[in-house]
Amino acid sequence: MSREPARVEDRLDVALVAMPFAPVQTPSIGLGIVHAALAGRGLATRTFHAHIDFLEHIGVRDQLLLSTLTTKSAVADWLFTPVAFPEFDDDPEPYLRAVYDREPGLRGEPYADARARLLGLRARTPAFVDARVDELLATGARIVGCSSSFQQHVASLALLRRLRERAPAVVTLLGGPNCDTVMGRTTHRCFPWVDYVVCGEADLIVGDLAEQVLERGRDLDAEALGEGVLGPVHRASGYPRGDGPDDGVRATADDLRAAPFPDYDDYFARLDRSPLGDLVQPALAFEFSRGCWWGQRHACRFCGLNLTGLRYRSRPPEAIADALERLT
């Protein structure tokens, strides 16, 4: 069930979107923090949980099938390529055969049936994306941002591209782990329908960024953007370079005492409206600290996910207790 179109008096400054394939049983902590930061500035903000919409769109049976497939097969990305990259007219047969041979979750049915099932899901994604764009446009939001982690990247690119095609005046943002350092730079360079990319931790910078974008749109100079934010200006002037493990830039929230705790209200409101809500046992992501106190001193050889954010920082115990009481 989709949210009712916003009334005129409910028009938003910023719409945040969690695209598939974020887990439906938990809200995005990243979007929750960004939501709280923007609302704290007095900006009208709403978080849209399109991963729950997608569960309703395809049904539990197909959602369970997709959850069994490995990330190496990239089916989650492939499903959204018709919208993200419509100019790429591929022959799906070699890919589908390779996926079928690799994935035990598909081999419970004949290849022809599994092939038809995946092609059917892919054929339904354009309508799903258009419905999400309809919902966003009904709010009048001037900024739309997505958070991308693991298999959300192509789905997020698909949404933002279709939004650009239908509403060129809306400013688009992308952030999240898939935009860290050089990944964010590559995303920004390759996909011109993404106006701004936040590389790293947005907690303490997203409020200023949103306020400036609402005032000046895409016309922010590099100095106004600050470290970790890439904008249209960088496509013309060149991209900044960092001094970390790679040469990408990254924003870091040095003082977590100034960072807001996440706002999850929109997630639970959406789950309450879902006809499948009773099937979901929600869990909250909560953060006591960031980085790694051990890895900051003695980096583990096997750790390849967080090399750019190893510096350990923690939240005050009193603030943690208050936030836990509010959230639960």
Image (cartoon, grey):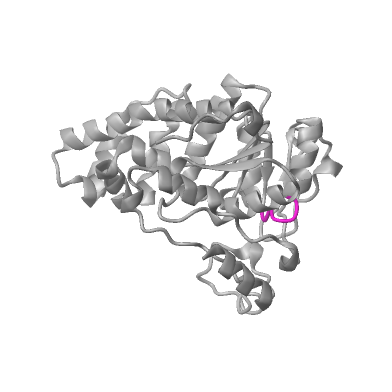
Q: Quadrant of residue 283?
A: bottom left
Asked whether, in this view, residue 101 is left or right of residue 312, the answer is left
Q: Residue at x 13, y 39 (%)?
A: 110
The quarter of the picture where the N terminus appears is top left
- Side (left or right) of 157 relative to 105: right
**Which residue is the extreme one toward the right?**
223
Tell whether 266 sits left or right of 319: left
Residue at 63 percent of width and 55 percent of height:
33
Q: Nearer the viewer, residue 172 or 296?
A: 172
Q: Residue at x 51, y 62 (%)?
A: 285
Q: Is residue 153 visible?
A: yes
Left or right: residue 164 versus residue 129 is: right
Q: Nearer the viewer, residue 12 or 168?
A: 12
Q: Vertical placement of 65 versus 78: above or below?
A: below
Q: Which residues are magenta?
A: 200-205
Coordinates of residue 209 in the picture (x, y in percent): 76, 43
Q: What x and y, as percent, mark residue 161?
A: 56, 28
In the image, is residue 298 above or below residue 158? below
The percent position of residue 61, horizontal first and vertical second, equals 24, 44
Q: Nearer the viewer, residue 237 or 105?
A: 105
Magenta-span inclusion, residue 90: no
**Predominant SS along the magenta part:** loop
List x then y, in percent, for residue 74. Answer: 39, 44
**Can you see residue 75?**
no
Relative to 142, residue 150 above or below: below
Q: How many numbered marks appear?
A: 0
